[in-house]
Amino acid sequence: KQEVTQIPAALSVPEGENLVLNCSFTDSAIYNLQWFRQDPGKGLTSLLLIQSSQREQTSGRLNASLDKSSGRSTLYIAASQPGDSATYLCAVSAGANSKLTFGKGITLSVRP
Amino acid sequence: GAGVSQSPSNKVTEKGKDVELRCDPISGHTALYWYRQSLGQGLEFLIYFQGNSAPDKSGLPSDRFSAERTGGSVSTLTIQRTQQEDSAVYLCASSFPSDRPNTGELFFGEGSRLTVL
């Protein structure tokens, strides 16, 4: 059974800091990995999708990497801003249009 | 519409009543998913539709839960005889067919917050 772990559960950093959010998964036979952002009381917003054949994806100040063999992904946020404060979730799927298995998320607070 | 639409956004009901939650996916998305998010918990998978059929309904917690999808579009999640432990946010997501780029990228609605008194 696939398990996804995100540690720590919460993180507080000063504005401007570069930071890395970690995600690990137990079964390396994944189809893709997706990072989401969730603001309080809201749904999930897709940030980056990495297919199993890819090593990384970039969008603006965000960069996600994938090391499938070691069961790890990182989300790098450059020059963090207070508006980046949210919960970041990582999820993996085993096949095209298969269900996603989610981690419990990392709640990020960026202090002005 | 432009995104996944869910209704109602909030529902308060009494224990024992039935509720229906609706999801309208992004046009052209053939895959549709229901998840549940309880306070302090992660996202729990409930059911997955491909078109109108549900190849994976392994996450439905009991026979009080059912879901259907008609016309390959709108889906309804029904909870019968609600219990207090059913209180949660019910999230719907959809994705493109598997022959499209970025297959498997899920787009979520804002969720339906259910409170069972």
Image: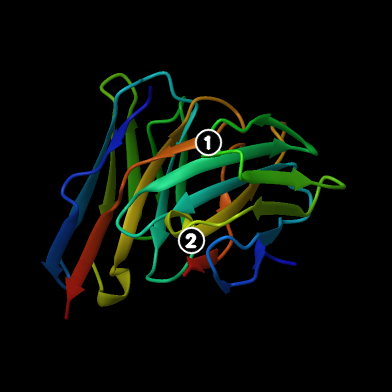
Which badge, 1 or 2, comes first in the chain's sequence?
1
Q: Which sits in the foreground, A56 or B95?
A: B95
The residue that label 1 is drawn on is B59
| Image spot of residue A101 (x, y percent) | 43, 36
Q: Residue at x 49, y 51 (%)?
A: B36
Bin the neighbour count of mark 2 within 10 Å (Cα to Cα): few under 14, some 14-19, many 20 and up.
Answer: many
Asked if one can make out residue A59 in the rendered structure from this viewpoint, the answer is no
Q: Is label 1 in a helix, a strand or a loop?
A: loop
- In the rendered structure, the answer to whether residue A52 lies left or right of residue A103 reads right
Separation (CA) of disc 1 from disc 2: 15 Å
Q: Which label belongs to residue B89?
A: 2
| Image spot of residue B99 (x, y percent) | 72, 31
Q: Which quadrant of the structure image shows residue B65?
A: top right
- Chain letter for the residue marked with disc 1 in the picture: B
- In the rendered structure, the answer to whether residue B87 lies left or right of residue B107 reads left
| Image spot of residue A49 (x, y percent) | 48, 43
Q: Which sits in the foreground, B95 or B88?
A: B88
- Chain letter for the residue marked with disc 2 in the picture: B
Quadrant into which the N terminus of chain A falls: top left
Asked if one can make out residue B105 in the rendered structure from this viewpoint, the answer is yes
Bin the neighbour count of mark 1 within 10 Å (Cα to Cα): few under 14, some 14-19, many 20 and up.
Answer: some
Which amino acid, mark 2?
Answer: Val
| Image spot of residue B34 (x, y percent) | 59, 47
Quadrant into which the C terminus of chain A falls: bottom left
Q: Is label 2 in a helix, a strand or a loop?
A: strand
Q: Which sits in the foreground, A32 or B39?
A: B39
- Residues at marks 1 and 2 touching, judged by CB atoms closer than 8 Å: no
